[in-house]
């Protein structure tokens, strides 16, 4: 069904929609989802852009194959670089030396992130924002200041991750950003040898918590070798019609209109 939050997002008829992708924890697949939604939306005809705001582990340059690019500034406005399928994107990873970690202080991080969001996005109609994991000051400032039109929360089905996902939901609601829905990642692993499906992180937990929070459930993405390998190579599986990308494409279809 179409959620009320989503109708509100659509009804705003803004020329450009910012959609934040958040998670309570790191390592649950937030960046992987962002990159694949981007390519899936691009294939659906959107002018999609990506802001990688994950200051602690910017992985979009790898996921969307733009590691060597350096954004230029024109009159103090950053010009996005191009990743896979020509997708315009900006990442903290483009602004710092490769492999170099920066211990960002809150105000510094907020300043740098603002430059990414307020870059020259041209005719992009949907911009996906890959947020840092968790619910700290940086995330709160980011959503309060830039008010994305909606947010998606990713979690694994594991109890601990779910508790943090619920917290992330609260962060968005506090900031007045409607949650478009929840996505379950790393659900179900099919053994490549015998085909038996097991659930390393449990099963169905995200759908249950979505029900409890009265938020839409957008879908589940299986844990597969193909997704992990494609991500490392900078070829998001949703960029072609193979099985590995199907779950991402189905979620993207719910955002496209
Ligand atoms: P986050 O952005 O939440 O920190 P990532 O998207 O970077 O998480 O994913 C963490 C790791 O898990 C990466 O190595 C990624 O390739 C892998 N991964 C994510 N989702 C899946 C999946 N569905 N199947 C297999 N590997 C996955």
Image (spheres, rainbow, N blue to C red):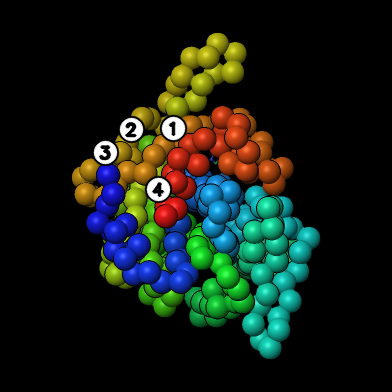
Find out whether the residues at labels 2 and 4 contact each other: C-beta distance under 8 Å: no
Residue occupying the far bottom of the picture: 75
N-term mark: 4 or 1: 1
Q: How far apart are marks 4 and 1 (CA)?
A: 20 Å
Q: Alpha carbon of mark 3 to alpha carbon of mark 4: how far? A: 20 Å
SS for callout 1: strand
Q: Give the crowd class for mark 3: few <14, some 14-19, many >=20 residues within 10 Å.
A: some
Mark 4: which secondary structure? loop
Give percent across and percent down for residue 199.
Answer: 43, 26
Return the mark for residue 204.
Answer: 2
Q: How crowded is mark 1: few (under 14 residues within 10 Å), some or many (20 or more)?
A: many
Specify whether tag 1 is near ligand 1 (CB below 8 Å). Answer: yes
Residue identified by numbered label 3: 208
Q: Name the residue under label 4.
A: 254
Asked whether mark 4 lies closer than 8 Å to ligand 1, one says no
Left or right: residue 248 versus residue 218 is right
Distance from label 1 to label 3 (Cα)? 14 Å
Q: Is mark 3 on a helix, strand or loop?
A: helix
Name the quadrant of the C terminus.
bottom left
Figure check: 239 above or below 3: above
- Of the two numbered discs 2 and 1 on the same chain, state the one appearing first in sequence: 1
- Residue drawn at x 32%, y 43% as measured from the top left: 217
Report the mark closest to the observer, 2 or 4: 4
**Residue drawn at x 74%, y 58% as measured from the top left:** 67
Q: Quadrant of ligand 1?
A: top right
Q: Mark 1 points at which residue?
A: 187
């Amino acid at each position: 069904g179409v959620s009320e939050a989503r109708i509100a997002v659509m009804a705003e008829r803004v020329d450009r929609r910012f959609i934040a992708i958040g998670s309570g924890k790191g390592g649950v697949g937030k960046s992987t989802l962002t990159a694949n939604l981007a390519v899936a939306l691009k294939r659906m005809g959107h002018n999609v852009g990506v802001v990688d705001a994950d200051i602690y582990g910017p992985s979009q340059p790898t996921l969307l194959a733009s590691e060597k690019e350096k954004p230029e500034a024109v009159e103090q406005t950053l010009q996005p670089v191009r990743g896979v399928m020509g997708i315009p994107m900006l990442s903290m990873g483009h602004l710092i030396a490769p492999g170099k970690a920066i211990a960002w202080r809150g105000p510094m991080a907020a300043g740098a992130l603002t430059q990414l969001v307020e870059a020259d996005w041209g005719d992009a109609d949907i911009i996906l924002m890959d947020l840092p994991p968790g619910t700290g000051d940086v995330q709160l400032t980011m959503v309060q200041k830039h008010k994305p039109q909606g947010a998606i929360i990713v979690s694994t089905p594991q109890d601990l991750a779910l508790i943090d996902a619920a917290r992330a939901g609260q962060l968005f609601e506090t900031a007045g950003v409607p949650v478009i829905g929840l996505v379950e990642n790393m659900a179900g692993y099919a053994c490549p040898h015998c085909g038996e499906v097991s659930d390393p992180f449990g099963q169905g937990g995200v759908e249950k918590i979505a029900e409890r929070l009265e938020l839409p459930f957008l879908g589940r993405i299986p844990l597969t070798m193909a997704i992990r390998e494609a991500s490392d190579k900078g070829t998001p599986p949703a960029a072609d019609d193979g099985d590995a990308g199907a779950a991402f494409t189905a979620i993207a279809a719910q955002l496209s209109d």
